[in-house]
Amino acid sequence: MSDAVIVCTGLTKIYGRGEQAVPVLQGIDFELRAGERVAIVGSSGSGKSTLLHVLGGLDSPTAGTVRVKGQDWATLDETAKGLLRNKTLGFVYQFHHLLPEFSALENVAMPLLIRREARATAYQQATEALQAVGLGHRLTHKPGELSGGERQRTAIARALVTRPSAVLMDEPTGNLDENTAASIQQLLLQLNEQSGVSFLIVTHDTRFAAKMQRVLTLHEGRLSGNG
């Protein structure tokens, strides 16, 4: 489809060889379309994080293809992969992975500075991204001065600041208390609707998953579900 952001075909990932071989992903076909939000659920160890890493070009499949905006990861060298990730994808993890010595503003601006945007431009866009997640008043605070929810909001702002086509999220609220998690989940739904960015979210939270447009289950290496 022309509006597909990510397309994988026959995606297979096997760890080890011979008798030690462990198949994690087995012939997965999947599309993430522009603007949609999709949840992937499954038991611990089912390969959900592996799937995200392969889709995001952070790991290579054993077989099959992954295309992001029409570009096949397998045809790109590491520099080209980095450029495609920076331009097209955002990532949010269970743990925020913010740089502790930098302020929220500096952390969020980092992807833009890496692509050599002018510092003034990067800081302006980072400010807007932090304002969008409700942290316009915390620009100069370092991660250690922020609450858990504020750190995760900062990580979300960092993922969105490059105006990506899709954001891949691995348990984005899994490390938060129930009330904070609910607040972050509501924020993500609003951002998806307002920005038109596609969200692919791995989560154990079935209530959160139910708020997605599609819910897919990864079981024994295969995806199944509504779409």
Image (cartoon, rainbow, N blue to C red):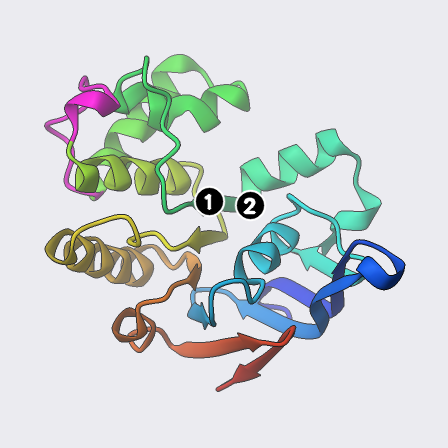
Q: Quadrant of residue 132?
A: top left
Q: Are marks 1 and 2 in contact (CB under 8 Å)?
A: no
SS assignment at label 1: strand
Please state, as top left, top right, bottom left or bottom right, where the N terminus lies in the image: bottom right
Mark 2, other Cα within 10 Å: few <14 / some 14–19 / many ≥20: some
Residue, far bottom: 226
Specify the amino acid type for callout 2.
Thr
Q: Which residue is mark 1?
A: 91
Mark 1, other Cα within 10 Å: few <14 / some 14–19 / many ≥20: many
Please, what is the dominant secondary structure of the magenta stretch? loop
Q: Which residue is mark 2?
A: 88
Q: Quadrant of residue 181?
A: bottom left
On screen, residue 45 versus residue 133, left or right, reads: right
Magenta span has 144? yes
Magenta span has 134? yes
SS assignment at label 2: helix
Residue, far right: 18
How many marks overall?
A: 2
Give the foreground label among 1 and 2: 1
The segment highlighted magenta reads 133-146
Residue at x-position 70% and y-position 58%? 67
Q: Is residue 223 above or below residue 191?
A: below
Residue 48, how many percent across, how many down? 54, 62
Specify the amino acid type for callout 1.
Phe
On screen, residue 153 versus residue 158, left or right, reads: left
Residue 92, how many percent across, how many down? 41, 45
Q: Nearer the viewer, residue 170 or 158?
A: 170
